[in-house]
Image: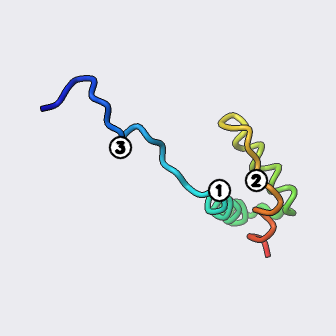
Amino acid sequence: MSYKNEYNRFMMQPAKISTTGFVRFYILYMLHKGQEMYGLEMIEKIEEDFADVTNWKPSNSTVYPILK
């Protein structure tokens, strides 16, 4: 039996990805595109690219270990 306005808890939750995992893949993406930049420039670029979605920016402690 299905109701028209039934709440489906599995369909209502957004997909989740860890912050470090996202930053790792996005840095690889930027490097693959040939954008050579320092760590601080990467942080600013990520912040700029996602400014319309969120006010989050990756911290130095997230980015620099990935670049090591």
On-image quarter of the C terminus: bottom right
The CA span between labels 1 and 2 is: 8 Å
- Which residue was labeled with disc 3? 10
Q: Which mark is residue 58?
A: 2
Of the pair 10 and 23, the residue shown nearer to us:
10
Residue 60, how many percent across, how many down?
83, 60
Task: Please say if the residues under marks 2 and 3 sit with CB atoms less than 8 Å apart.
Answer: no
Q: Earlier in the sequence, mark 1 or mark 3?
A: 3
What amino acid is at disc 3?
Answer: Phe
On-image quarter of the N terminus: top left
Mark 2: secondary structure: loop
Mark 1: secondary structure: helix
Q: Is residue 26 above or below residue 64?
A: above
Q: Quadrant of residue 63?
A: bottom right
Of the pair 23 and 33, the residue shown nearer to us:
23
Q: Is residue 37 above or below residue 15?
A: below
What amino acid is at disc 1?
Answer: Thr
Q: How many numbered circles are shown?
A: 3
Residue 39, how many percent across, how many down?
84, 62
Q: Earlier in the sequence, mark 1 or mark 2?
A: 1
- Which residue was labeled with disc 1? 19
Mark 3: secondary structure: loop
Q: Is residue 64 above or below residue 18?
A: below
Of the pair 12 and 52, the residue shown nearer to us:
12
Task: Please say if the residues under marks 1 and 2 sit with CB atoms less than 8 Å apart.
Answer: yes
Residue 23, how many percent across, how many down?
68, 59
Q: Nearer the viewer, mark 2 or mark 3?
A: 3
